[in-house]
Amino acid sequence: MMIFRKAPFTILVAVVLVASTFSFSGTATLAADSNGKDLIIYQNIPEAEVKVEGNQIELTALNIYEDGHFKTTSEGLTWDSSNKNVATVDENGVVTFTGQNGRSFITVSNGESTDRIAVHRKHSENLVIKEKETRYHVIDNAIKGMTLQEKIGQMLMPDFRNWNGENVTEMLPEIEQLIQEYHLGGVILFAENVVTTEQTARLVADYQEASEKYGLLMTIDQEGGIVTRLQSGTHMPGNMALGATRSPETAENVGQVIGAELQALGINMNLAPVLDVNNNPDNPVIGVRSFGESPELVADMGTAYIQGLQNTGVAATAKHFPGHGDTDVDSHLGLPEVPHDKERLLEVELFPFQQAMEKGIDAVMTAHVTFPEIDDTKVISQKDGKEISLPATLSHKVLTGLMREEMGYDGVIITDALNMAAITEHFGSVDAVIQSVKAGTDIILMPVGLEEVADGLMEAVETGEITEERIEESVKRILTLKIERGIIQSENPLPVDEIVANAEEIVGSDAHKQVEADAAEQSITLIKNEDALPFDFSSEEKLVVVGNTYINSLYDALRAYHENTELIVASGPLTSDQLEELDDASAVVVGSYTYNVNGRSPDNPQMQMIHQLIQEMEAPVVGVGIRNPYDVMAFPSIDAYLAQYGFRPSSFEATAATIFGENHPTGQLPVTIPDQNGDVLFEYGFGLSY
């Protein structure tokens, strides 16, 4: 499969024009060859973005088959330039502008079919001039040749995380059969599927080979931070850490690295970034996955991340529309509600999504959250027969009325996973899919019961509940995304060993690790410091690290700076023997780990332990919020406190460097931290340094 670059956020060197605006001699050959195929140049497709890098552009040829499906081809072709003084072309379709003004036609032929595209040099600009004929309307022609089952298949994106109780790490014949039987348009991968670089590259290549006509959207949640699926490569700090850096450049670099590693593995769509505005400290599911509480910060950092990601050719997805930040229920477990009116939503929750839409986001993911001020429709829950509001994923008023019509978005809409409790507890699996498609969804993510859902959609079309034209609208958007991102089946795919070798050079490279380290160091936020930091210990002085979750990672990072460091693993108040171990400590570093409001309750054993340390110790007690910056709400009298926003290795290393003065903290709080009474404890933007 060929992957082409698309950079919607950058000004391209190429200027693309339509051939009819110029007077050219000659015409392109339109007739199909004796095998019923037509040969065209990919860059002539209206939806294909043309990019000249420096003074070169690589053209690609496509075979168009009688039923409308298309594949790239590279063998048995002859490329030629009509004016080599203006531009030359090699045997692989790479066009080089000479720098001389003028025009040349670049022609490709397989001996039976021919196509051409014009290139033009004028006023120091390299122009690429598309032909304008119906043969290039490959998306419309493909849809005309599809069966209804094939159209529905393009909209389905299941997961194959496990099969018969075993993690799927290599292609299985049963999965290959399902891909072909249901003509699937995409598959989502999870951590269980992506263990090593080589294994992942081979698995993804096998998935693409299993798809007979159209390239698969190979999708993953590689947000960075706490939602990182790849088990090899770099493990970038998450969004709230990036928000703390206040650096869109850093966010773009992180997106670029994530995209480069996914692209090298053949993964062409990332369900990231989260554009939810996290203005609720009690949010149990978004939290540090958000860039922060400011709509402007989320928009600035999010669009920069998107730019970096999409510049690598990987499709980005903004989630969770219209906003999951101001909730205190996890939609994996229940059905949350956002009660605000539209004016407030436009100012806060919707603002980052609108900015991303205006800057070319490839896809938007829906939220399984109710917004009664936008859609007050009531339905009866299958769980208990009670009346509930309709979640955004199933709401025509939200997806079509708000997103499509009011906000002007015409890209791909993908549901959040339909196996989440917010949907499965209240709606039947087939009914939920039908309602979602009627609402405006294009891609059905992780439907419950692939056969039942596919059959249910077929029946809905056959009975007129959903029109075939509505299905075709979604298929057109999906195929447009695939064309734009170069997700096209190839008749001459690269050998998998070459794919693996390239991936092993890119995934986890030294340059990528440096971006990871830089982002982590910039994110560390020193929120309180009563002359406790930085440490400057002699080798005889003892440091003790206390905590439970991820505490070994914090201990290892600190011990790398100070060998005389001991560890006490505890999730509640220390015993008398453990307290004795602290008698000769010069300082204690305690790591806290919470993800919801209960974790920082005064009755929580972890918080009781931290209060015990503060009361018992004469030496400084330094707190590290391993995940949640809000932890300090429970122990504001601590001597010093740092937030690192996640549990990836680079964050622990950056925290240790900060504690020992090697890294001077520059992070600024991307959220307000209230006290237990709701007053401001540490304001948005606060951050200390040395």
Image (tube, helix red, strand yellow):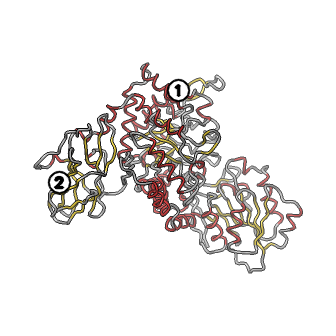
Q: Amino acid at mark 2?
A: Phe
Residue at coordinates 75% horizontally, 60% vertically from top-left?
547
Q: Is residue 470 above or below residue 527?
A: above
Residue 344 appears in view: no
Q: Amino acid at mark 1?
A: Thr
184 or 274, nearer to the observer: 184
Q: Mark 2: which secondary structure?
A: strand
Within-10-Å neighbours for mark 1: few <14, some 14–19, many 20+: some
Residue identified by numbered label 1: 377
435 or 396, nearer to the observer: 435
Looking at this view, name the residue that lies furthest to the right.
576
Give whichever of discs 1 and 2 has the lower sequence position.
2
Q: CA distance from mark 1 to mark 2?
A: 58 Å
Looking at this view, name the residue that lies furthest to the top.
463
187 or 550, nearer to the observer: 187
Q: Is residue 142 left or right of residue 219?
A: left
Position in image of residue 82 (x %, y %): 15, 56
Quadrant of the drawing holding the C terminus:
bottom right
Q: Mark 1: which secondary structure?
A: loop
Residue identified by numbered label 2: 105
389 or 96, nearer to the observer: 96
Q: Is residue 143 above or below residue 10?
A: above
Position in image of residue 665 (x %, y %): 59, 69
Position in image of residue 379 (x %, y %): 56, 24
Residue at coordinates 62% horizontally, 58% vertically from top-left?
645
Residue 639 appears in view: yes
Q: Is residue 88 left or right of residue 510?
A: left
